[in-house]
Amino acid sequence: MKLREFEGKRVFAEAGIPVPRGRVIRPGDEPGDLDEFGDEVVLKAQVDVGGRGKAGGVVICPTAEAPARAGDLFGTTIRGLPVTEILVEERLPIVHEYYCAVMVDRSTSQPVVLFAEAGGVEIEETAKNDPDRVRRVGISPLLSGLPPFAVRDLVGAAPKALAPIVSALYRAFLANDAILAEINPLAILEDGRVMAVDAKVIVDDNALARQGIAQNRDLSEREREAERHGFSYVELDGDVGVVGNGAGLTMATLDLIEHYGLRAANFLDVGGGADRERVAHAVRLLALSPGVRVIIVNLLGGITRCDEVALGIVDAGVRQRIIVRMAGTNEEEGRAILGEHGYEMYGSMDEAVAAAAGGTR
């Protein structure tokens, strides 16, 4: 489960990581006295999408204008998602931006800590074009904290004040059963203080029962719907919806989507033996998101029957473009049903995702 930025910063603050002074407001709230934040503030829309700054979701303004500017922001959508919460924060005098993250390396089944001396919005391009600038250290899950040598290797020649933040981020990652804890940017201010300017935290769904922050969080409409039907569902920040059966197949679909330069909107595993009704519910759930432009249905028929899958897709009756790849039990019958209704079908996962890339770029 992906936490909102202000929730992630609460996690960081509890771990001893400095975060900007701020307050969350919602439509109809009285923002109260914001003068404590200085002459200027930053309004940050709390929507689960990437690139919100470039899409108008981050506004810098004089503190006196903040209530009016927040009212304007509440009436907008960011990449198809309505703005219902805004984090109002002090504006910080940043001298240099760094990047730091802890995540699960699925290839080694252990945490890996990342650090780069260039943070901010261009970190993805940096990692892609100059990967040596991003330092990586794998950590044994048997260790309760980061060894000092690992912190030294990561921080390198960067200011020593960053070292305790790296260690604290790793502790927060472990304590909250996270699969990702990211600070971008991790900033050095004019007065020498270190500050986590942004926060991204994703908690392992399998650990939600013991994580209080997850239990107390308001679920989105789509998350509630997924929970009601027993789907394994994670919201992401792209525009390509994914329905699969089996975690491995669904993850492989997400990897291929990224390979083609697209961004997945979700992870949704309907499980084995999905029937007509279950498939229809899954497709309708993805259609609830105004940011989803195309839905890829990628299912293998073993216990699951392809004709039931096809009928479920037809029953869903959604407006979004649907691309289907299915193989296995009753495949021909399923293809016939979809063919009668004009749905796009492909014989391989690669062809299906390539078709989505051609239609969404």
Image (cartoon, rainbow, N blue to C red):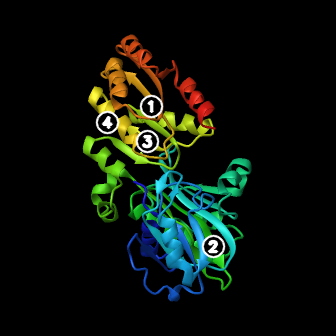
Q: Quadrant of the N terminus?
A: bottom left
Vertically, is 41 above or below 245? below
- Would you name the residue on which mark 3 appears? 267
Between residue 102 and residue 282, name the one nearer to us.
282
- Amino acid at pointer 3: Phe
- Would you name the residue on which mark 4 appears? 281
Mark 1 lies on a secondary structure that is helix
Q: Could you tell me residue 329's position as x and y percent?
A: 35, 15
- Amino acid at pointer 4: His
Q: Residue 85: which disc? A: none
Separation of marks 3 and 2 at Cα, in angstroms: 32 Å
Q: Quadrant of the C terminus?
A: top right
Dot 3 alpha-carbon crowd within 10 angstroms: few under 14, some 14 to 19, many 20 or more: many
Vertically, is 61 above or below 253? below
Separation of marks 1 and 3 at Cα, in angstroms: 11 Å
Separation of marks 1 and 2 at Cα, in angstroms: 39 Å
Mark 4 in CB contact with mark 2 (< 8 angstroms):
no
- Badge nearest the viewer, 4 or 3: 4
Separation of marks 4 and 1 at Cα, in angstroms: 19 Å
- Badge nearest the viewer, 4 or 2: 4
- Badge nearest the viewer, 4 or 1: 4
Q: Earlier in the sequence, mark 4 or mark 3?
A: 3
Separation of marks 4 and 3 at Cα, in angstroms: 15 Å
- Would you name the residue on which mark 1 appears? 249
Dot 1 alpha-carbon crowd within 10 angstroms: few under 14, some 14 to 19, many 20 or more: some
Separation of marks 4 and 2 at Cα, in angstroms: 44 Å
- Quarter of the view holding residue 275: top left
- Amino acid at pointer 2: Ala
Q: Is residue 149 left or right of residue 282?
A: right
Mark 1 in CB contact with mark 3 (< 8 angstroms):
no
Q: Residue 187: which disc? A: 2
Q: Could you tell me residue 214's position as x and y percent?
A: 33, 60
